[in-house]
Image (spheres, rainbow, N blue to C red):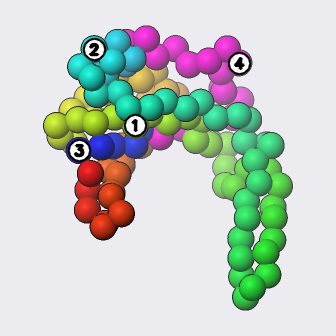
Amino acid sequence: MRFLLNLYLNVADLPGEGFDHEEFLAAAGQAGELISAHAFADPSISAVIRVRGGMVTVTEGPYLRTSEHVAGQYVVDCESRERAVELAGLIPSGQAGGVEVRPLMDSAGMEM
């Protein structure tokens, strides 16, 4: 099964030089479970596009009005949800903001 691991951090705690995730990367990489990894730019330079009644609006800045934002994500392919949770526990972001473990679905709506 594939899982998306969203990393939540307080904007003030966003890393300047990258994430310190060597233990996670080693475990997931050696097991062949790491599919992809992405660190996100500062949320203040994001934009949200909405279409309502045929009208397109663009809102500058972070989507959520909170101190925590998705700072990055990993996609892993594991045997079970329990293994994805175990890997997520190796990510230091879980100590600061949190790591969301979410199953991915294929185009038919079934878990991958």
Residue 20, magenta (yes or no): yes
Q: Amino acid at mark 1?
A: Val
Q: Which residue is mark 2?
A: 30
Q: SS class of the residue under badge 1?
A: strand
Q: Mark on residue 1? A: 3
Q: Are marks 3 and 4 in contact (CB under 8 Å)?
A: no
Q: Which residue is mark 4?
A: 16
Q: Tell which of 54 and 94 is nearer to you.
A: 54
Q: Mark on residue 75? A: 1
Of label 4 and label 1, which has the lower sequence position?
A: 4
Q: In the rendered image, which quarter is residue 17 located in?
A: top right
Residue 38, magenta (yes or no): no
x, y (%) of residue 111? 26, 56
Q: SS class of the residue under badge 3?
A: loop
x, y (%) of residue 101? 36, 43
Q: CA distance from mark 2 to mark 1?
A: 15 Å
Of label 3 and label 1, which has the lower sequence position?
A: 3
| Residue extent of the magenta highlight | 6-23
Q: Amino acid at mark 4?
A: Gly
Of label 2 and label 3, which has the lower sequence position?
A: 3
Q: Judge the density around disc 3: few (<14), some (14-19), many (≥20) Cα neighbours within 10 Å.
A: some
In this rendering, the answer to whether 85 lies above or below 111 is: above
Q: Tell which of 112 and 72 is nearer to you.
A: 112
Q: Residue at x 73, y 59 (%)?
A: 48
